[in-house]
């Protein structure tokens, strides 16, 4: 197949993920780049829309749930990881991508984030980090930097933000990556790597929110970001190096920051089970009509 034919096939495959629903994100929102990168990664990995499942949390990012033609589920606020975990356990050969904003991940659902990493459920989890609650008109979140003027804290946020990668790296993760919504090439490649990874692939995406977060603009990010490819000798298998780099204040490291290929995923950890069987099939069918009758 010629290069042009190949390209045209890929474009057709990309368009097969289109739903035709109107996008309602603000102009310049980072969500466009993230959705575009997810779709590109799925196409480049050879998946058809019916072969994958995506779960969405509440927030501006969740509004993508009807913008991509695949198996999608829009869950409760902060609960996207349990939802995706169930889907991953019941469909062990189906790639699952879950996503949520910084509010849902670092406040409402922070317990699920920690246990998702600990359990190493097989999924890609994308944190859309726009450092505020955009859907509810720009309040500070647990990721907002100190001093940022937000609705609700007009004199400046005063609590130290939670560093999502630092938190993830302290939960014995298997895959921690970071990218930027404006760098769709890097982000697409990281999502592809996440899809190939067996276990919980965490990708934090710094996302511009030009409507409510006026200080973390695209140009601010472009000055602050540093791809670890440009850091000589960076060893992504060394967790101490990864912890050190995500704590840097003078730049924001991006790329695949840490990977542990030895850590078993949730299914493989349970050596007493037949890991190749589907847990749903393991549930024995039982006639419960007599039990139901006893309540009537
Ligand atoms: Fe995007 Fe911010 Fe607008 Fe939400 S409020 S759609 S995050 S720019």
Image: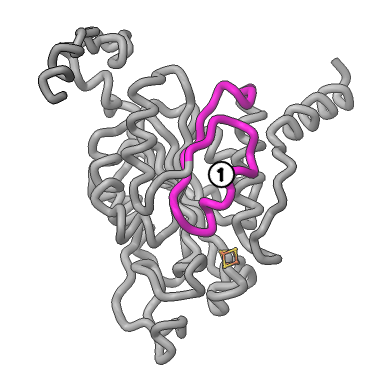
| Residue at 54 percent of width and 73 percent of height | 216
Residue 138 image position (x, y, % from top left): 49, 74
| Residue at 60 percent of width and 55 percent of height | 31
Please say which color scheme the image uses. Answer: one colour
| Residue at 38 percent of width and 69 percent of height | 141
Vertical order, 292 against 154 (above or below) = above
Dot 1 surroundings within 10 Å: few (below 14), some, or many (20 or more)?
Answer: some
Quarter of the image for the C terminus: give it: top left
Question: Does 126 lie within the magenta span?
Answer: no
Residue ranking furthest to the front: 296
Residue 222 image position (x, y, % from top left): 61, 66
Q: Which residue is mark 1?
A: 65
- The answer to whether residue 97 is left or right of residue 271 is right
For label 1, the SS is loop
Q: Is residue 227 visible?
A: no
Vertical order, 6 against 157 (above or below) = above
Residue ranking furthest to the bottom: 155
Residue ranking furthest to the left: 294
Closer to the camera, 235 or 255? 255
Question: Does 61 lie within the magenta span?
Answer: yes
Q: Which residues are magenta?
A: 46-73
If the picture is divided into quarters, which one holds ligand 1?
A: bottom right
Vertical order, 24 against 187 (above or below) = below
Q: Is residue 187 visible?
A: yes
Q: Examine the image and state in which quarter residue 86 appears.
A: top left
């Amino acid at each position: 197949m010629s290069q042009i034919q190949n390209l045209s096939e890929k474009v057709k495959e990309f368009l097969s993920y289109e739903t035709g629903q109107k996008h309602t994100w603000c102009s310049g929102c980072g969500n466009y780049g993230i959705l575009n990168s997810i779709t590109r990664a799925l196409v480049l990995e050879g998946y058809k829309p019916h072969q994958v499942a995506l779960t969405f949390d509440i927030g501006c990012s969740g509004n993508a749930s009807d913008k991509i033609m695949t198996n999608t589920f829009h869950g409760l606020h902060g609960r996207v990881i349990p939802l995706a975990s169930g889907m991953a356990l019941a469909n062990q050969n189906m790639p699952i991508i879950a996503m949520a904003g910084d509010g849902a991940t670092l406040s409402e659902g922070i317990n699920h984030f920690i246990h998702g990493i600990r359990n190493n459920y097989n999924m890609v989890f994308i944190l859309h980090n726009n450092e505020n609650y955009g859907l509810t008109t720009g309040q500070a979140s647990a990721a907002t930097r100190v001093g940022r003027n937000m609705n609700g804290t007009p004199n400046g946020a005063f609590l130290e933000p939670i560093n999502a990668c630092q938190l993830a790296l302290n939960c014995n993760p298997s895959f921690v990556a970071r990218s930027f919504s404006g760098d769709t090439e890097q982000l697409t490649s990281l999502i592809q790597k996440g899809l190939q990874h067996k276990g919980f692939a965490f990708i934090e995406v710094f996302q511009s929110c030009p409507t409510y977060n006026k200080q973390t603009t695209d140009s601010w990010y472009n000055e602050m970001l540093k791809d670890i490819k440009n850091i000589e000798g960076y060893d992504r298998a060394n967790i101490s190096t990864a912890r050190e780099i995500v704590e840097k204040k003078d730049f924001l490291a991006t790329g695949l920051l840490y990977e542990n290929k030895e850590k078993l995923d949730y299914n493989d950890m349970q050596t007493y089970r037949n890991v190749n069987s589907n847990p749903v099939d393991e549930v024995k069918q039982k006639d419960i009509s007599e039990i139901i009758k006893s309540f009537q």
